[in-house]
Image: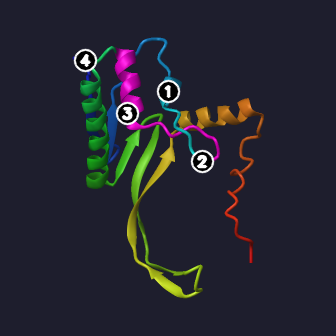
């Protein structure tokens, strides 16, 4: 029997794993093929290109797999919906070689309003966290090596907000 979609199953004492079965992609398919349409000229502030959108992903997958965009959009949306629904229900979704989405509870805390200096209570809330998988980490480290930057050299400097430090 051939796997053609999503598979949800329990393993290792009850942890839920969502397995996305990889379609047979053409050998020339690359994740770098999924990029914003250069014709749109979309540019972020700072001169960087705009983020890749769901529409860009759908267009690229449809072209690479020779599928109609409408059908591809439905498949991509169902994949996202399955991830969200599973995350809400099970609190954790593990996508092998991609990463782990997990819901964590942030406790109530006291913070300070930066404008007034007044202390405010930040209520408890649930947040989604993401831990990248080994393959993603390795691919991101390759960017550092290609750019000639040592891995682990820290985050880029903060953007200039025009405000002076106190």
Quadrant in the picture for residue 81: top left
Residue under pointer 4: 2
Q: Tell me, yes or no, whether the highlighted magenta stretch contains residue 63.
A: yes
The boundaries of the magenta stretch are 46-65
Q: CA distance from mark 4 to mark 3?
A: 28 Å
For marks 1 and 4, the one nearer the N-term is 4
Left or right: 123 in relation to 155: left
Left or right: 146 in relation to 136: right
For marks 3 and 1, the one nearer the N-term is 1
Q: CA distance from mark 1 to mark 2?
A: 18 Å
Residue drawn at (61%, 36%), measured in percent from left and top? 140
Residue drawn at (42%, 12%), measured in percent from left and top? 26
Q: Which mark is residue 39?
A: 1
Asked whether residue 50 appears in the rendered view, the answer is yes
For marks 4 and 3, the one nearer the N-term is 4
Q: Tell me, yes or no, whether the highlighted magenta stretch contains residue 51.
A: yes
Q: CA distance from mark 2 to mark 4?
A: 46 Å
Residue under pointer 3: 55
Q: With respect to residue 128, does 150 lie above or below?
A: above
User: Number of numbered discs present?
Assistant: 4
For marks 3 and 2, the one nearer the N-term is 2
Q: Residues within 10 Å of mark 4 (few under 14, many from 20)?
A: few
Q: Which mark is residue 45?
A: 2
């Amino acid at each position: 029997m051939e796997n053609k979609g999503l598979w949800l199953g329990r393993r290792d004492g009850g942890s839920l794993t969502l397995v996305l079965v990889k379609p047979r992609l053409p050998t020339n398919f690359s994740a770098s093929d999924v990029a914003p349409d250069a014709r749109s000229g979309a540019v972020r502030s700072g001169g960087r290109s705009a983020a890749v959108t769901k529409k860009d992903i759908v267009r690229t997958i449809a072209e690479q797999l020779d599928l109609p965009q409408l059908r591809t959009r439905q498949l991509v949306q169902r994949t996202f919906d399955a991830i969200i629904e599973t995350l809400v229900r099970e609190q954790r979704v593990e996508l092998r070689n991609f990463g782990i989405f997990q819901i964590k509870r942030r406790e109530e805390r006291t913070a300070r309003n930066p404008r007034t200096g007044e202390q405010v209570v930040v209520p408890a809330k649930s947040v989604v966290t993401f831990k990248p998988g080994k393959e993603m980490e390795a691919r991101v480290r390759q960017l550092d090596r290609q750019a000639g930057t040592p891995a682990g050299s820290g985050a880029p400097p903060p953007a200039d907000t025009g405000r002076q430090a106190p």
